[in-house]
């Protein structure tokens, strides 16, 4: 993250104690519309707590949980539909659990901050795969720097695969410097 930016959000690993809160979020209409059943999703999240391929996280703002976020490596799962992405690519999924905090910029800011952290750890590309009907999410991801690269049908349903590359910011800075 550039030095002038202050980290607004804290990312911490999901624990068993977080599961009831996440279950509550998954049952809310603004989340349930885009995720599988709360039972299915909660079982998957519980399974990811000790996973090496998926990192489930709680996003906190001012010390209070506001979102669920996970990152994953599509190359660590046989037959993953995004294994065609460059080696080192990571995928992310996010949902803001607290409905009063939806639509006011947290999604874009969280994704932007988290992507910068993943780039800092060496990831060359980050992908995210919203439902094409989820216009609010797509706009938030575009504001965070993602661009659509493909539309796919997979085990996850109809998705708009979006990506951001680590070197995109460098290219924009180079272009700006050349224009001076």
Image (cartoon, rainbow, N blue to C red):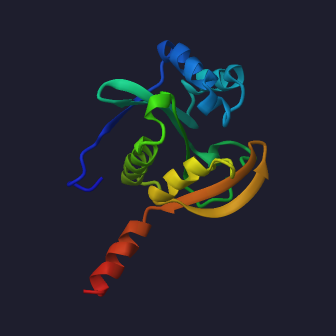
Q: Residue at 48% of width from left, 12% of height from top? A: 17
Q: In which quadrant of the rendered view does residue 151 lie?
A: bottom right
Res 47 seen here: no
- Which residue is at the front of the view, 137 or 118? 137
Image location of residue 30, percent across then percent down: 60, 32
Q: Residue furthest toward the bottom?
A: 179
Which quadrant does the C terminus fall into?
bottom left
Image location of residue 44, percent across then percent down: 65, 26
User: Looking at the image, is 140 positioned above or below residue 67?
Assistant: below
Image location of residue 20, percent across then percent down: 54, 13
On screen, residue 165 versus residue 113, left or right, reads right
Q: Residue furthest toward the left?
A: 4
Total numbered labels: 0
Image location of residue 171, percent across then percent down: 39, 74
On screen, residue 55 versus residue 32, left or right, reads left
User: Looking at the image, is 49 positioned above or below residue 171?
Assistant: above
Q: Residue at 63% of width from left, 49% of height from top? A: 129
- Which residue is at the front of the view, 143 or 40? 143
Q: Residue at 73% of width from left, 44% of height from top? A: 78
User: Looking at the image, is 180 positioned above or below residue 151?
Assistant: below
Res 150 seen here: yes
- Which residue is at the front of the view, 2 or 180? 180
Q: Residue at 70% of width from left, 51% of height from top? A: 159
């Amino acid at each position: 993250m550039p030095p002038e930016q202050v980290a607004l959000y804290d990312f911490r690993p999901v624990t068993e104690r977080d599961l009831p809160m996440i279950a509550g979020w998954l049952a809310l209409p603004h989340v349930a519309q885009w995720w599988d059943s709360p039972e299915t999703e909660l079982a998957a999240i519980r399974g990811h707590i000790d996973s090496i391929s998926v990192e489930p996280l709680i996003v906190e703002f001012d010390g209070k949980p506001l979102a669920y976020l996970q990152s994953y490596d599509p190359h660590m799962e046989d037959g993953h539909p995004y294994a065609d992405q460059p080696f080192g690519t990571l995928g992310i999924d996010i949902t803001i659990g607290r409905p009063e905090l939806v639509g006011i910029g947290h999604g874009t800011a969280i994704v932007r901050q988290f992507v910068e952290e993943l780039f800092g750890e060496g990831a060359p590309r980050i992908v995210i795969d919203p439902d094409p009907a989820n216009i609010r999410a797509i706009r938030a991801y575009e504001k965070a720097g993602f661009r659509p690269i493909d539309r796919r049908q997979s085990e996850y349903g109809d998705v708009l695969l979006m990506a951001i590359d680590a070197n995109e910011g460098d290219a924009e800075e180079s272009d700006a410097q050349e224009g001076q």
